[in-house]
Image: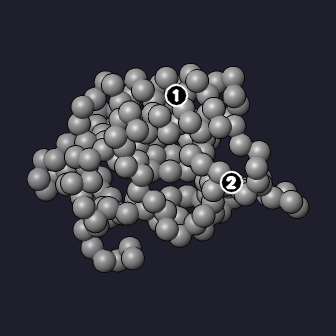
């Protein structure tokens, strides 16, 4: 299997509530890391469960990690086009990010990644990609790009590991 001309092996994988993870080894240099895709709780009554799962994910692995997907959480008021913001969940999300010293790989192509597709649209930045320092150090040119959405209310995010100029 390969991503952007990087050949890798999936060493193990796991499917749980809120996430799918894979332990991956790069065939070129045997670099091992973990890929986690998430789908966060859309409703308040399950958001704490989701945040608890996020803490468990990070607590059970001390290696390079790439974690992304639909978190269904915003970080600040600039992540949404209206003032209807639950700051409790925003603060809790930021606390998780800071606790694990995660770096967000910003998507420079889109201000928002989700819309409700209504006449008076609500738009928000719900889809994100985070990395731990070790992965970013190994792939210093890593970047994220939003691509046109097709049949979804979310903008798909593509991660490029920076091994060629074809993505820019």
Q: Is residue 8 shown to the viewer in this render?
A: no
Count numbered badges in the picture.
2
Q: Which residue is depicted at the point 38% across and 73% down?
A: 167
- According to the picture, the residue beneath numbered tag 2 turns out to be 80
Q: Quadrant of the C terminus?
A: bottom left
Horizontal side of 47 relative to 138 (left or right) equals: right
Left or right: residue 125 compared with residue 57: right
Say the numbered circle drawn on residue 17.
none
Q: Which residue is mark 1?
A: 51
SS at badge 1:
helix
- Residue lying farthest to the right in this orientation: 119
Task: Where is residue 151? Give x, y as percent.
Answer: 69, 58
Residue depicted at x 30% and y 44%: 132
Q: Is residue 108 above or below residue 139?
A: below
Q: Is residue 67 positioned above or below 119 on the image?
A: above
How is colour applied across the structure in the image? one colour
Q: Residues within 10 Å of mark 2 (few under 14, many from 20)?
A: many
Relative placement, left or right, of 153 versus 75 is right
- Mark 2: which secondary structure? loop
Q: Residues within 10 Å of mark 1 (few under 14, many from 20)?
A: many
Q: Earlier in the sequence, mark 1 or mark 2?
A: 1
Query: Which is more toward the observer, 26 or 58?
Result: 58
User: Residue 13 at x, y = what percent?
Assistant: 35, 32
Q: Residue at image x 50%, y 58%? A: 157
Q: Is 158 placed above or below 24 here? A: below
Q: Is residue 110 visible?
A: yes
Q: Tell us which disc is closer to us: 1 or 2.
A: 2
Q: In the image shown, does 60 or 76 lie closer to the viewer? A: 76
Image coordinates of residue 123 in percent, x first then y, are 72, 56
Q: x, y (%) of residue 129?
A: 44, 50
């Amino acid at each position: 299997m390969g991503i952007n001309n990087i050949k890798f092996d999936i060493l193990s994988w796991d499917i749980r509530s809120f996430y799918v993870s894979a332990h991956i080894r790069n065939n070129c240099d045997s670099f091992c890391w973990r890929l986690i895709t998430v789908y966060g709780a859309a409703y308040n009554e399950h958001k704490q469960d989701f945040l608890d799962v996020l803490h468990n994910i990070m607590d059970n692995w001390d290696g390079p990690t790439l974690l992304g997907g639909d978190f269904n959480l915003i970080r600040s008021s600039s992540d949404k086009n209206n003032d209807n913001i639950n700051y409790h969940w925003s603060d809790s999300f930021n606390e998780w990010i800071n606790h694990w010293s995660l770096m967000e790989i910003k998507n420079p192509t889109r201000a928002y990644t989700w819309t409700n597709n209504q006449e008076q649209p609500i738009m928000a930045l719900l889809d994100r990609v985070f990395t731990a320092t070790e992965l970013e150090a190994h792939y210093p040119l890593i970047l994220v790009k939003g691509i046109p959405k097709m049949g979804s209310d979310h903008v798909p995010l593509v991660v490029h590991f920076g091994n060629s100029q074809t993505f820019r």
